[in-house]
Amino acid sequence: MYQTIVRDWRNEEVTLRHHKSPISARNLANDLPDEVIDLLLETCRKNTAVFERFFKLKARLLGMEKLRRYDIYAPVAKADKDYDYSKAAAKVLQSFGQFDERFARLAERVFAEDHLDAEVRKGKRGGAFCATSAPDLTPWVLLNYQGKTDDVATMAHELGHAIHSMLAEHHSLFTQHANLPLAETASTFGEMMLVDQLLAEESDAAVRRDLLFKQVDDAYATIQRQAFFSMFEKQAHQMVIDGASVDEISAAYMENLKTQFGEAVEVAEEFKYEWVSIPHIYQVPFYVYAYAFGQLLVLSLYKQFKAEGESFKPRYIQLLAAGGSESPMKILDDAGVNVRTPAFWQGGFDVLSAMVDKLEQMS
Ligand SMILES: [Zn+2]
């Protein structure tokens, strides 16, 4: 099936439509230049040491000599601290307000209009999301709030989405929504603001550890895992065209995992078939780098914010207020964010590396 999909993709996108390479077709759909995506993936490949260090630390805290691939998301600290709902809401608003008063006021609007459904009820769907239906309507937020630190972070995340939509509410129904590469900007940045605040005021080491572990766990799953899938896809598309067998493709996938985890994680033989179970690879070739792009972009922006302070804020607000009214590159350029340099993307990994430093010091 995969071989047929890859050949089809090549015939249509490269042979007929003359895209430079199989991934170029997706890059055009995302409105992102090939060089920027190459740079993103290259930076991820260069930074495998950050997560290797993280997994080694996790192994030590779990009392294992070496982490197995099965265990990489295992929880380490188990803080039993609960935040009651109104205290959590106040904390989120406070952390937004510390960044910019406008952010807090917009988030308050969601509460004031009773557009936030947080309670767990029988028959209610699980998870969390923010729904923006039209520019003249305050977005709706659904949560299933249960008082854990994670739940507070999710509240900040979904309210971040709502703020993004409200800052762009002067656009039309068709251009209000940020397009895919920028869609997680305000949500992830909102989480970072909250984490900063909680880390600064939280005296319970287990809570601090939980918070940092969650951030790095998420960053692994969203950035590094997805970037390595994309590298594999690039390779697999070429291999199929060169006539590779399924076994050869699986062997290449295993090599990809070894590059990704180095000596830090023991990868069992059956993981060579993992790629077979990733639906995106079949249904939407080269989709997954968008997750890595979005998340690393935010960490890099955050690094820029830390370096520049106040002068960063109006540019960041301008970026969000553009919604989906321009191409992502134009929006980023206009906000003075240069994603064409290796240093920008490295900045995101520097933030992660500093989190791992903190975790090492705590442990
Ligand atoms: Zn989100």
Image (cartoon, rainbow, N blue to C red):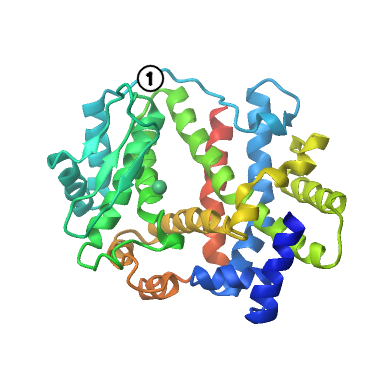
Q: Which of the pair 60/281 is nearer the observer? A: 281
Q: Which of the pair 151/264 is nearer the observer? A: 151
Q: Which residue is mark 1?
A: 81
Residue 37: percent from left, percent from top: 59, 67
Residue 227: percent from left, percent from top: 63, 55
Residue 355: percent from left, percent from top: 52, 41
At a point 30% along the width and 38% down the height, the residue shown is 142
Q: Is residue 57 visible?
A: yes
Residue located farthest toward the top when viewing the structure as drawn: 80
At a point 86% along the width and 64% down the height, the residue shown is 243
Q: Decide if ligand 1 comes within 8 Å of the CB at mark 1.
A: no
- Image check: 145 left or right of 285? left
Secondary structure found at label 1: loop
Q: Which of the pair 210/231 is nearer the observer? A: 231
Quarter holding the N terminus is bottom right
- Image check: 314 left or right of 40? left
Quarter holding the C terminus is top right
- Image check: 245 left or right of 14? right
Q: How many labels were placed on the picture?
A: 1
Mark 1: few/some/many CA within 10 Å (<14, 14-19, 20+): few
The vertical placement of 270 against 224, above or below, is: above
Q: Is residue 46 visible?
A: no
At a point 56% along the width and 25% down the height, the residue shown is 76
Amino acid marked by disc 1: Lys
Residue 238: percent from left, percent from top: 78, 66
The vertical placement of 248 against 266, above or below, is: below
At a point 33% along the width and 28% down the height, the residue shown is 124
The vertical placement of 216 against 186, above or below, is: above
